[in-house]
Image (tube, helix red, strand yellow):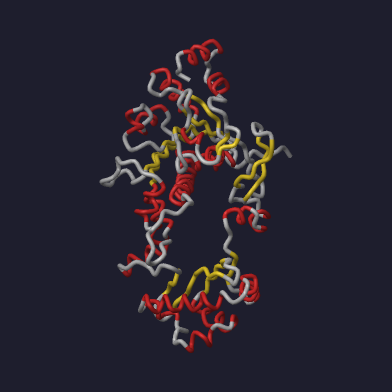
Amino acid sequence: MGKSTGPLQGVRAVTCSTAQAGTVPYMFMADLGAEIIKIEVPGKGDGSRNAGEMKDGESSFFETNNRGVKSLTLNLKSDEGKEILHKLIKTADIFGQNFSPGAAERNGFGYEELRKINPSLVYASISAYGPDGPSANLPGTDAVGQALGGVTEAFAVPGQQMRTGVASVADETCAMLTLSGILAAYIHSKNTGIGQKIETSLIGSAFRLMGWTMTTAMWRNKSPITGARINGSRDRAGIAACFNDIDGKALAIQLDPNHWKPALELLGFYTTLKENNLEDLGLAFESDIKKDQILSLLSQMFSKKKRSYWINKLRKARMVAAPVNSMVEASNDPDIVANNYVSEIDHPRLGHKIKTHGTPWKFSETPSVLGVSSTLGEHNNGILSELGYKKEQIVKLEQKNII
């Protein structure tokens, strides 16, 4: 059997996308075997080529979000550049862009224009605020998604200034939702021959990320308890929270209502909480003071021993507990490593192996193949030759800064 090239072998996507939410969907598709052609500005490229950690001219940001993706430089402000793009669109299954609403139309690659060239085209458009609201034309980033979607409050610490999380959760969630929308529309297109436009946004994705916690807030018309995740109801409360051990190392636990009292008894905490009239977790729904008292007393008790002691006790009873990893610790975690969620690949330009994300899926028949990012314009000759351009024509396009 020949080497698999992934479940999306034969799929071609063309993208005019930058940043994170706009590139990660196509990086995933490249992992899965699709051919992804990224359009970049001649001589300049995607600005994120210089973002993140830089090593010998290579960017951790660009590498993470554009691995396995081909680079074609095109000046889309020129007629010849647009002509090349339109020729590519005839051969493509998918087109993606994350310009502000209206910008694609002004630059010759709006949906209505491209669908005339390829009626079966799946067209994915990502924005910050969504296409229809009062802020639709404003620029926005991951911080906007976290702020407006409720994520910032969800991870707030009572009494402290709210902060944007260092992980770009709005960007990444938007990327994954965009990917799922693209694949759904692609199946529909293959079955019917009819393409369509898919629109996603940072705020919509962050809002969806909040899941049932947001639904509960809407039903109650009240924000959830923060500082720890105490959920359920006054009569049936559960908890997810982090506590420091004797060495200041954190562990995470999550106990459903049925496990609350048995866990406290197992850990030797129940008597102390009962003596302080704090054994009922539902008190947290009545009073922030009671909530803080419960959490404070739990913190004191967890700080008496090492986290491995507490984790082993809970895990032996089939209750949920885990160490809290730093990002570096996460990249070396035995479960993450064993499942190839982190991988080491040879980087041809750096001349050594680099650590990078694996893929979050395991396919039994068509495993993912990880590539590396392309240099600016690396695939100009190959792609243009495929479109019928002769060598001398390509040279002229270079001289005129079209590519």
The number of numbered discs placed on residues in the rendered structure image is 0
Looking at the picture, how far across and down is residue 57, in whole percent? Answer: 57, 32
Residue at the outermost right position: 1
- Side (left or right) of 138 relative to 8: left
* Residue 161: quadrant of the picture: bottom left
Residue 194 in sight here: no
Residue at 38% of width from left, 55% of height from top?
207
* Residue 316: quadrant of the picture: bottom right
Closer to the camera in the image, 260 or 15: 260
Residue at 32% of width from left, 70% of height from top?
220
Residue 284 in sight here: yes
Residue at 60% of width from left, 65% of height from top?
323
Closer to the camera in the image, 208 or 300: 300
Residue at the outermost left position: 134
- Side (left or right) of 160 relative to 14: left
Looking at the picture, how far across and down is residue 166, in whole percent? Answer: 47, 52
* Residue 307: quadrant of the picture: bottom right
Residue at 55% of width from left, 82% of height from top?
269
- Side (left or right) of 54 relative to 282: right
Residue at the outermost bottom position: 275
Closer to the camera in the image, 220 or 298: 298
**Above or below: residue 357 compared with residue 232:** above
Looking at the picture, how far across and down is residue 230, in whole percent? Answer: 44, 72
On-image quarter of the N terminus: top right
Looking at the picture, how far across and down is residue 180, in whole percent? Answer: 48, 47
Residue at the outermost front position: 247
